[in-house]
Amino acid sequence: MDAQGRQIGILKLVVNGQAVPLSSTQMTPAQQTSILTAANCEIRFDALTRHLYARDASHYHVEPVAVAFPRGARQASSIIHAAAEAGLAVIPRGAGTGLIGG
């Protein structure tokens, strides 16, 4: 993981029907957003939502790239796969009362 908590690895991005190896450190935020948006799940990128979900009851504050709201196992699976493709870590969240930054 890098300093922002994003997974680093070799990814393949499909460009014009061709799989192109791409490190997540080379993927632009626009490319990450495009991949996440294609998932069949409600997802928000606005500053207010990202700020509200940046912390729990602990002292940790890490603003996410996006916040997803899956409504079932299929949507959860879809957004997790999309995040992996975009090179982003997924941090599950319950009620936000945790004390360990998750």
Image (cartoon, rainbow, N blue to C red):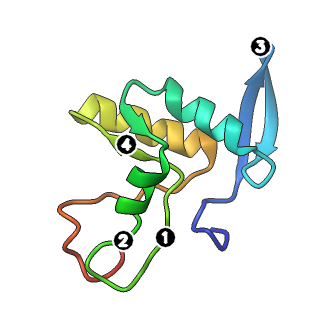
Closer-to-camera residue (63/19): 63
> Residue 6 falls in which quadrant of the image?
bottom right
Asked if disc 3 and disc 1 are in contact, CB closer than 8 Å, the reply is no
Q: Earlier in the sequence, mark 3 or mark 4?
A: 3
- Spatial CA distance of label 3 from label 1 is 35 Å
Q: Residue furthest front?
A: 48
Label 3 belongs to which residue?
17
Left or right: where 88 falls relative to 70: right
Label number found at residue 62: 1
Asked if marks 1 and 2 touch (Cβ < 8 Å), the reply is yes
89 shown above or below 98: above
Query: Count of labels shown?
Result: 4
Sooner in the amino-acid sequence: mark 3 or mark 2: 3
Which residue carries the number 2 mark?
55
Q: Residue at x 35, y 32 (%)?
A: 42
Residue 53 visible at all = no
Tag 4: residue type?
Ala
* Mark 2 or mark 4, earlier in chain: 2
